[in-house]
Amino acid sequence: MKPGPHKLPRPVKLAYALPAFAMAVVGIPVYIYIPKFYTDVMGLDIAVVGAGLLGLRLFDAITDPVMGMLSDRTASPLGRRRPYIAVGATVLCLAIACLFNPPQLGLPWTTAWFFIWLALVFLFWTVAVVPYEALGPELTFDYHERTVLFGYRDGFLIAGTMMAAIVPVIIRTTLRSTGTSFTDHTVFFIMSLVYIPLILACCGICVVRVREHATTAVPEPFHLKESLAPLLDNKPFGILVVAFAFSAIAAQMPATLILFYVEHVLESNRAELFLLLYFVSGVVFLPAWVRLARRIGKKAAWMASMAINTGAFFYVFWLGPGDEGVYGALVFVSGIGFGAGLALPSALTADVIDFDESRTGKRREGQYIGVFSVAKKMAGATGAGLGLWALGFFGYEAGQPQGPEAIFALRTLYALVPCLLSIVALAVAGFYPLSQKHHQEIMAQRPSP
């Protein structure tokens, strides 16, 4: 396969999309199940676990852009990106095996075990994922074909997220139905047996089947300040990052609080069902967003998806006990824009990289993806951290009936605050200047690959 401004064969798109599926399957346990496992089962203090998660996320602010710059400057027979995908995925599997299967140690050693292997999971996740995401913009330079490619990738990401939500349930149900005695250790052991081969297979297929675009770039000395300067001077990229950050915070805050909202506001125990409904809606409507972006442009389609999500979610604030049916309908409608919120910013980032090349003559996919990845992770940490902190500030007490003030705060943080943040994201996104016409003008001046 020779990348360029043409359409990619479907097998290549599928091969490129596979690692997104595997990484999403692992991401849910690492961010949701593992903290609870180490606090409730292994005995770690929840404040220690929370501080560790936040600190390691901040460390990504260094590792992500550095990994992007390193892959941009790599020259090897396998290309710039694929060696890191192969090595990162392999070591990531080792780290997952250890994180999911801690030995019975004393509390200090268990705490050290948790931090060491979680840090290695995050580090080698970065080693694999930043070059993987940087590979996408290099595979095709066609404005619309990129949207299709990222639609494949993010469709697989959503499917992986859906699988991650049901795998622990399937494991527990199967063990119970067979009369097998099990503990949480058993569940996590089986999860690691499922996830590790999945990561190796999906990333291996991508490395073997996807060919990188040949580059004549000569590796340059590494200077962090000089490397970041062109990115910071790229106005379209700055607008895109700010708009995406606000939208990501708006998405992460309700994602963190949904279990609390469903239990204490709706007084329901069907949170997993509502999550699945949201993701199914995202998968079903993603192809429609790809087609709409081709018709009205990526920016307009992305803004439309945010408007739909915001409009539907606003009404969630007014719901109360017994409103499961209305809530389910609103969740489904708000999920319509979920896939677009993943795929279209990625496609716009690829166009911004072309804009940078037209000004500087250099391709910096890794650097741009690294910085964009930092914005994504920091926004996610901010949404989760602020939501939980504010909920505690207004009187939430775990395991206790919640007072009116805590319930009002929960409804506000879950629905109103994210809607306001989405409105800010919409306003900022309106200033994004690159249209299809501008991109075609940029590509017309680009030498043929």
Image (cartoon, grey):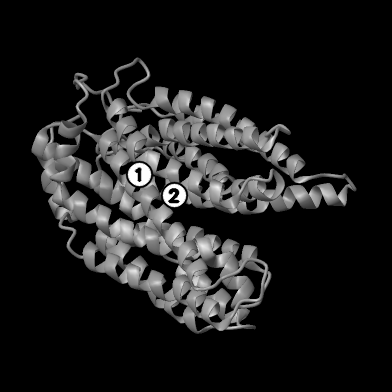
Q: Position of residue 440 (x, y in %)?
A: 15, 48
- Quadrant of the rendering where the C terminus is positioned: top left
Residue 78 shows in the view? yes
Q: Is residue 210 left or right of residue 447?
A: right
Residue 154 — which label? 2
Q: Residue 443 at what x, y percent from top left?
A: 15, 41
- First-in-chain label (2 vs 1): 2
Kindly indicate whether the residue at mark 1 contacts the one at mark 2 (C-beta within 8 angstroms).
no
Question: In the picture shown, does residue 128 fall above or below 386?
Answer: above
How far from the left and from the top, in percent, is residue 160? 55, 47
Report which quarter residue 2 is drawn in: top left
Residue at 17% from the left image edge and 54% from the top image edge: 434
Query: Amino acid type of disc 1?
Result: Ser
Q: Which residue is mark 1?
A: 373
Q: Is residue 135 above or below residue 91?
A: below
Would residue 147 be visible to someone looking at this image? no
* Quadrant of residue 358 within the rendered picture: top left
71 vs 20, nearest the viewer = 71
The amino acid sitting under disc 2 is: Asp
Tag count in the figure? 2
User: What secondary structure is marked by label 1?
Assistant: helix
Mark 2 surroundings: few (<14), some (14-19) or many (≥20) residues within 10 A: many
- Label 2 or label 1, whichever lies nearer to me, is 1
Q: Which quarter of the image is occupied by the N terminus?
A: top left
Q: Closest to the observer: 211 or 187?
A: 187
Distance from the alpha carbon under mark 2 to that under mark 1: 15 Å
Secondary element at image label 2: helix
Q: Which mark is residue 187?
A: none
